[in-house]
Amino acid sequence: MGLLRSELEISLNVADDASLPGWDAMIRAQQRLELPWALEKIRRHIGYRAHILDLGCGYGGVANELAKTGHMVTGLDHDPEVLGIAKMRDKTQSVQYRLGEIDQLPFANQSFDVVTALDVLCHLDDCAEALKEATRVLRPGGIFLFNNFNRTLGAWLVAVKGQEWFIKNTPAGYHEFGRFKKPQVLARQLRRAGLEPVQMRGVSPVLLQRSFFKLIYEGSVNEDFHFHFCRTPWLGYVGFAQKRRFY
């Protein structure tokens, strides 16, 4: 039986810190959907106390929430400034934040039960090395949780142009269409890295919601903005893969 949202106490309120830019608020809105899903996979395949590495942890939205549920979490990012913010926002004061690059992880082989890469792969020109490193630091049978944008016209309109047009303070080139990957392409890369894809699910914002129209008119993302799972990954997808036990 899956975890209910209420059981997880996910508190990724996009209004928690007004200093965060609108594009980051959009990421956190998506995480409110994806984190309960990720925690269910971790509980089912690993248990209630996993050793987790969060790649590209940024402001700590994923790492800090995972730590609240009792997991042992390490967050890694290449930006010392955002690591400082993430550490300040860690209410458990248990997350180990490390400075480093995701294609050269400063960890020993088989150090983690779980590696997460949420809002990471879509920023890489080539994710092959990052996937190899994720596999290296995973223990046999460990799981890799990820998301990405699909390489579709819808993804270009919404995630690239729509974000530039409608969300305030979005950095130029924040999303580049050439970095998006079709699910079948990413699945092949996962297998080459030693990870067996288990599930991929389409994810998109709910378009017919009041906060969506408010975003278009005002350029801001409020706490009512939400995403849902959908049948087809016309925009993006979330998934998990498992490290082969003999790899």
Image (cartoon, helix red, strand yellow):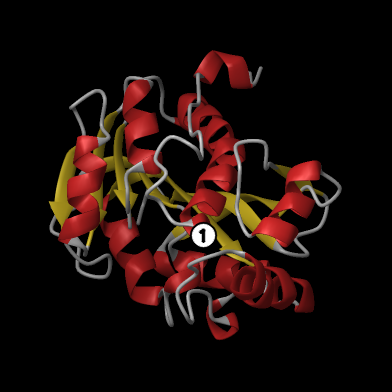
Q: Which residue is drawn at 44% across and 56% down?
A: 21
The residue tagged 1 is 23
Residue 9 shows in the view: yes
Disc 1 secondary structure class: helix
> Please, which residue is most extreme toward the bottom here?
178
39 or 78, nearer to the observer: 78
93 or 108, nearer to the observer: 93
Q: Which residue is drawn at 43% across and 62% down?
A: 120
Relative horizontal placement of residue 150, taking residue 39 as reference (left or right): right
Residue 136, horizontal then vertical, whole percent: 27, 58
Relative horizontal placement of residue 38, taking residue 73 as reference (left or right): right
Callout 1 amino acid:
Trp
Q: Residue at x 69, y 55 (%)?
A: 215
- Quadrant of the image containing the C terminus: bottom left
Residue 175, horizontal then vertical, whole percent: 53, 75
Residue 110 shows in the view: no
Q: Which residue is drawn at 39% across and 40% down?
A: 17
For label 1, the crowd category at 10 Å Cα-Cα, with few meaning under 14, some 14 to 19 and many 20 or more, is many
Residue 213, horizontal then vertical, whole percent: 79, 53
238 or 188, nearer to the observer: 238
